[in-house]
Image (tube, rainbow, N blue to C red):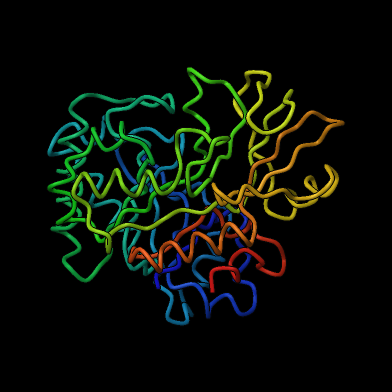
Amino acid sequence: MYISGYIGEGRFDGLRSGDEKILTHVNFSFAVVKDGLGSVAHWKNADKVREFMQNKQGIKAVLSVGGWGAGGFSDACSTPEGIEKLSSSLVAIMEDYGFDGIDLDWEYPGIGAAGIDHSPADKENFTAWVQSLRNKLGKDKLITMAAGAFQGCIDNLEIDKLVNLLDFFNLMTYDMTRDLTNRRHTCHHTALYESPNSNSMYGDKAVNLYLAAGVPLDKLVLGAAFYARIFAGASGLDTPFNGEVPTWTGGYADALERAEKAGGVQYDDQAKAAYAFDENTKEFITFDDPRSVKAKFDYVKTKGLKGIMFWEYTCDDKDSTLLRAMQ
């Protein structure tokens, strides 16, 4: 079973004891695109990454480039020369650190939701970029992508070509609170299934959308969240809130502390989603807990997906409670 964690290098201080026996892959985040080149010059804990790379204990380590709000992709990939320049620079970083591949976290080709540069030509240019990387890396190195859990992302990808170039698609089945245009109510941000109280976006739906688009089961990776989203000015689950984008809060320990202050963790058994509502602060808290993570793991195993991944490793508690729920 593929079990992968994204790791923000700025908070990384090595793996917690025993986690090397659970993780199969890690994605160090993020390289960025600067002046058309891949760069990790901003990394604060590069020495910790290099230290890990010297003793990976069988774990595959991947360089992830991009992230929410990280632009530069559209312009860099707008010409064959730009693609060559970007690809070569990323391969150079990968080889310098000894990474086992590259993860592409362009959010999202052809879509300006994150306020980044974009173009209708991104659809074909993204494929050309992946092809360039595959030509340089051959078959032995990994090339993966962080894929949006919605139809619009699929519509801006040449899935029929990418399935032959990418090793797998990491479905970002979290932060699924943005589809609030017509119904601005609190909802789960990382639900596995639909429920009467859930948003129109959920994990099983995302999997089926990609299957329908032509991605095979063994190239799909389901996402889990090791952090919470907070709706302010709410009255509970499936109620109006203050209209602001739900805020991101610290990791699982913080989410659990908030939930306990609110009277305890509640669980939507149909959606397989944990949540809490604080009557005093009027905050609705939505997150993954061991039950929901285990439900996702069981789903992946039963359905035959490639595996499960999560954002983000340092958001787990000191006992790796959520990661261990994936065993």
Q: Position of residue 35 (x, y in %)?
A: 33, 35
Q: Position of residue 280 (x, y in %)?
A: 87, 31
In terms of image quadrants, where is residue 124?
top left
**Looking at the image, which residue is at 66% across and 25% down?**
239
Q: Quadrant of the C terminus?
A: bottom right
Depth check, front residue: 315 or 173: 173
In terms of image quadrants, where is residue 78?
top left
Q: How many marks?
A: 0
**Looking at the image, which residue is at 46% across and 59% down?**
309
**Looking at the image, which residue is at 58% across and 67% down?**
323
In terms of image quadrants, where is residue 294?
bottom right
**Looking at the image, which residue is at 67% across and 51% down?**
251
Left or right: 240, with 71 as reference point: right
Q: Position of residue 237 (x, y in %)?
A: 67, 33
Q: Is residue 294 above or below residue 144?
A: below
Depth check, front residue: 60 or 97: 60
Q: Quadrant of the N terminus?
A: bottom left
Q: Is residue 258 above or below residue 99?
A: above
Q: Position of residue 148 (x, y in %)?
A: 37, 40
